[in-house]
Amino acid sequence: MTAATRRVRTPVQSPQKPRTPAQFSFEAKEKLDHIKEVENLSSYNDVVDFLYGLWKSGQPSMAGAFAGMGPFDRTGEEEDSHRTPY
């Protein structure tokens, strides 16, 4: 095979995900840059993912959805005919 007939393989590039423009205040950009540097992140997408992960982990559990409500107590109630005895 000669150099003229040899095929050159071009690297396959994955299609890029669509991007949306975003504008930040100067102060917000400085904060993003600081997080990017401190957490050793390579892109602003990584910064957003990092911040979202922190936010998501800080969400309260729904296990205690009525946290302000006291414990259930049957005293003072009439006897319920549909209640299963303990």
Image (cartoon, rainbow, N blue to C red):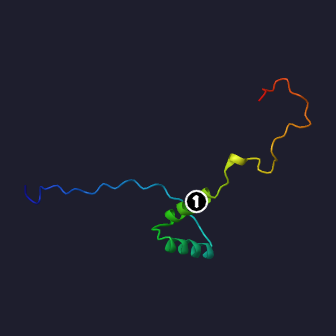
**84 vs 53: above or below:** above
Of 39 and 17, the residue lying toward us: 39
Of 67 and 32, the residue lying toward us: 67
Instruction: Specify whether 82 is left or right of 2.
Output: right
Q: State the residue lying farthest toward the top.
A: 81
**Residue at left offset 60%, top offset 70%:** 24
**57 vs 66: above or below:** below
User: Quadrant location of residue 76?
Assistant: top right
User: Residue 31 placed where, x, y %?
Assistant: 59, 74
Could you tell me which quadrant the N terminus lies in? bottom left
The kind of residue tagged 1 is Tyr
**Residue at left offset 47%, top offset 71%:** 40
User: Residue 43 placed where, x, y %?
Assistant: 47, 67
User: Quadrant location of residue 8?
Assistant: bottom left
User: Residue 12 placed where, x, y %?
Assistant: 30, 54
Instruction: Specify whether 38 is left or right of 75.
Output: left
User: Residue 36 placed where, x, y %?
Assistant: 51, 71
- Mark 1 nearby-residue class (10 Å; few <14, some 14–19, many ≥20): few
Could you tell me which quadrant the C terminus lies in? top right
Q: State the residue lying farthest toward the front.
A: 86
Q: What element carries label 1?
A: helix
Instruction: Specify whether 45 is left or right of 25.
Output: left
**80 vs 56: above or below:** above
**Residue at left offset 12%, top offset 55%:** 5
For disc 1, the marked residue is 52
Q: How many labels does the image show?
A: 1
**18 vs 77: above or below:** below
